[in-house]
Image (tube, rainbow, N blue to C red):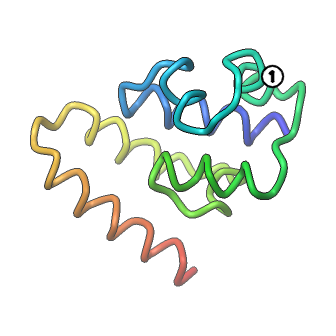
């Protein structure tokens, strides 16, 4: 799933995380995460859920192409207030669940 890999990479970078950091959080190797981000491997369902949780998104979003979400993520990545980021991400997640 190339789209999934692109979304994981974009979200990870927008949140200022390195591959090493996300891989450690997920309990996988950097090589495995790189394979997912490049679309060479698909994650298991349980890993997909862990990725979504770590990146603060609904799992279904990882396989969609929604440029509006990434525009908001770019804005949030520049914000210095973690509480605002958290609140906005919660709102976006709730909106995604109601689609």
Q: Is residue 76 above or below residue 45?
A: above
Please state which of residues 67 and 51 is positioned toward the viewer in this rendering. 51
Q: Position of residue 27 (x, y in %)?
A: 64, 35
Please state which of residues 36 and 22 is positioned toward the viewer in this rendering. 22
Measuring 66% from the left and 49% from the top, which residue is drawn there?
A: 65
Q: Is residue 27 above or below residue 67?
A: above
Which picture quadrant has residue 59? bottom right
Instruction: Indicate left or right for 95 with 39 as reference.
Output: left
10 Å crowding of disc 1: few (<14), some (14-19), many (20+): some
Measuring 33% from the left and 70% from the top, which residue is drawn there?
A: 91
Measuring 66% from the left and 51% from the top, which residue is drawn there?
A: 62
Which picture quadrant has residue 90? bottom left
Q: Position of residue 37 (x, y in %)?
A: 72, 27
Q: Position of residue 9 (x, y in %)?
A: 59, 28
Instruction: Indicate left or right for 91 with 8 as reference.
Output: left
Indicate the quadrant containing the C terminus: top left, top right, bottom left or bottom right. Answer: bottom right
Instruction: Indicate left or right for 64 with 14 as reference.
Output: right
Instruction: Indicate left or right for 12 with 31 as reference.
Output: left
- Seen as rendered, the residue at the extreme left is 81
- Seen as rendered, the residue at the extreme bottom is 98
**Label 1 secondary element:** helix
Measuring 36% from the left and 25% from the top, which residue is drawn there?
A: 16
Indicate the quadrant containing the N terminus: top left, top right, bottom left or bottom right. Answer: top right
Which residue has dot 1 on it?
Answer: 35
Q: Position of residue 12 (x, y in %)?
A: 49, 32
């Amino acid at each position: 799933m190339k789209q999934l890999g692109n979304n994981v990479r974009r979200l990870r970078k927008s949140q200022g995380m390195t591959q090493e950091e996300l891989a450690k959080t997920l309990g996988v190797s950097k090589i495995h995460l790189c394979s997912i981000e490049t679309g060479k491997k698909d994650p298991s369902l349980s890993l997909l859920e862990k990725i979504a949780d770590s990146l603060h998104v609904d799992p279904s979003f990882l396989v969609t192409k929604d440029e509006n979400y990434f525009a908001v993520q770019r804005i949030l990545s520049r914000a210095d207030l973690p509480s605002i980021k958290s609140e906005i991400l919660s709102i976006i997640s709730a909106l995604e669940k109601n689609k």
